[in-house]
Amino acid sequence: MRIDRFTNQLQTALADAQSLALGRDNNFMEPAHLLSALLEQQGGAVRPLLAQAGANIPRLKQALTAAIDRLPKVQGTSGDIHMSNDLGRLLNVADKLAQQKKDAYISSEMVLLAFFELNNSITALLQEVGVTKDKLEAAIEKVRGGEGVDNPEAEGNRQALDKYTIDLTQRAE
């Protein structure tokens, strides 16, 4: 797996997930760490995407925190954090999905879709908070507008109006 094929947002999320695992004394970086990092990312695409797909974001954050709290902890480590087999599989499936969509880079959206391909505990968690594969695919298609991921900044360039402006009409309501 080549990290240079990840979008900048996904690379940042992986670094944040590693930091989260280190801070929680987890020896392995798991899919829950990555999804939590993607949700907390400032200006990231995942939170708005999951909201469009019908997710209850606060409930998802609580469930992810609980899942991370249940992970095994190792005291006295030298700071070595390894990628778990589950996370490796998730990223490989995301790579495959990106190739099927003819994307040049692997984006956070493909990671979300990969959860539904693997059908693991995070998939069940996403379904509990209201996200289905069909809703997620529809939200991704709406956000992408038929465009692929052809550069590492593609995720950051989407939804610019939502990120950099304030809808005063919505606030007034």
Image: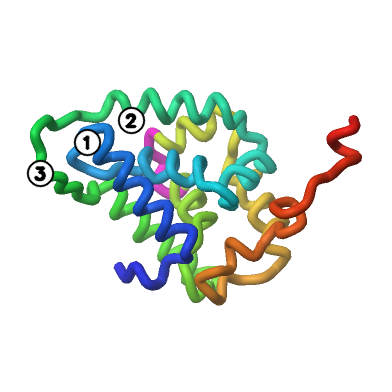
Looking at the image, residue 67 lies above or below residue 102: above
| Nearer to the camera, 90 or 68 | 68
Q: Position of residue 21 (x, y in %)?
A: 28, 40
| Nearer to the camera, 23 or 98 | 23
> Disc 1 designates what residue?
26
Q: Secondary structure at mark 3?
A: loop
Q: Secondary structure at mark 2?
A: helix
Q: Mark 3: which amino acid?
A: Ser
Q: Position of residue 23 (x, y in %)?
A: 27, 36
Looking at the image, residue 11 lies above or below residue 151: above
Q: Mark 2: which amino acid?
A: Ile
Majority secondary structure in the magenta region: helix
Which quadrant of the figure contains the C terminus? Answer: top right
Q: Earlier in the sequence, mark 2 or mark 1?
A: 1
Kindly identify the residue that appears in the image at 90 percent across and 32 percent down: 172
- Magenta stretch, residue numbers: 117-121
- Mark 2–mark 1 contact, CB under 8 Å? yes
Q: Mark 2 to mark 1: distance in Å?
A: 9 Å
Q: Is residue 118 magenta?
A: yes
Q: Secondary structure at mark 1?
A: loop
Mark on residue 78?
A: 3
> Disc 2 designates what residue?
68
Looking at the image, residue 43 lies above or below residue 27: below
Kindly identify the residue that appears in the image at 84 percent across and 44 percent down: 167
Q: Position of residue 103 (x, y in %)?
A: 53, 72
**Image quadrant in which you'd find residue 149:** bottom right
| Nearer to the camera, 26 or 19 | 19
Question: For the residue carrying disc 3, how many other residues have a C-alpha within 10 Å: few (<14), some (14-19), or many (20+)?
Answer: few
Kindly identify the residue that appears in the image at 31 percent across and 25 percent down: 69
Q: Position of residue 86 (x, y in %)?
A: 29, 46
Looking at the image, residue 117 lies above or below residue 146: above
Q: Mark 1 to mark 3: distance in Å?
A: 12 Å
